[in-house]
Image (spheres, helix red, strand yellow):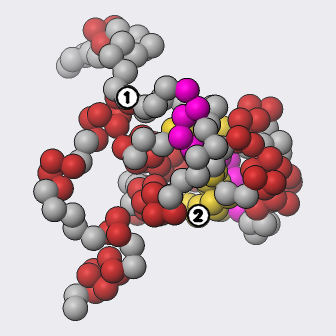
Amino acid sequence: MPHGHAAAAGHSFLRPWPGYQRCVETWDALRARRNVRVFSSRPLPADYVDQILEAGRRSPSARNWQPWDFIVVTGPERLAELSLVSPGAGYVAGAAAAIALIAATPDGERARDRTHYDLGQATMSIMVAAADLGIGSGHAGVADQLRARKVLGFPEDRFCPYLIALGYPAGRPLSPIVRPDRHPFEDVVHREHW
């Protein structure tokens, strides 16, 4: 059995699926994704969480650097503790799960920029993959690194810049947004020059 097939056997999301061209609904996931900060009590299937993490792992990275590690938190007490790492992270306490993005502390401005750019790409991959499964997400910055380290146990030479809360939306389910609250297309798209 080829190596790829052996690896795929352990995770259903890695196996090819019948008619995948009809199943990949990236455009719908992009149009449906919105920040969700109020979640239902419905738990997330473990294989969905793994699929979302796999999307983060496969994200583009400068020079294939992949500066990330992911810590998944699902316990209500831990989620409540994690919600205290930043004033804007309170909603993490009500999530079904949270993913903490962990990276090596960057040495210099260029490394810092590359780290945050790559983590931004991983964040978006995670959020789109979640939306594709009907799972809502919300991202928060982490202000209190000491508290985050205490809750998550990551090494001293690492930091946690971002959290992504996940769960099924408490209100309306995700569906493509017809009129997004965004600047008009014509105002932000320039062709050939400004």
For disc 2, the neighbor class at 10 Å (few under 14, some 14 to 19, many from 20) is: some
26 versus 172 height, above or below: below
- The residue located at (15%, 48%) in the rendering is 22
For the N terminus, the quadrant is: bottom left
131 on left or right of 17: right
Q: Which residue is mark 2?
A: 69
- The residue located at (76%, 61%) in the rendering is 152
Which kind of residue does numbered mark 2 sit on? Asp
57 on left or right of 107: left
- The residue located at (64%, 43%) in the rendering is 41
Of residue 102 and residue 90, the one placed in the foreground of this image is 90
**Mark 1 or mark 2: which comes first in sequence?**
2
Q: Position of residue 142 (x, y in %)?
A: 73, 43
Q: Position of residue 96 (x, y in %)?
A: 63, 49
Of residue 120 and residue 135, the one placed in the foreground of this image is 135
- The residue located at (40%, 11%) in the rendering is 183
The span picked out in magenta is: 158-171
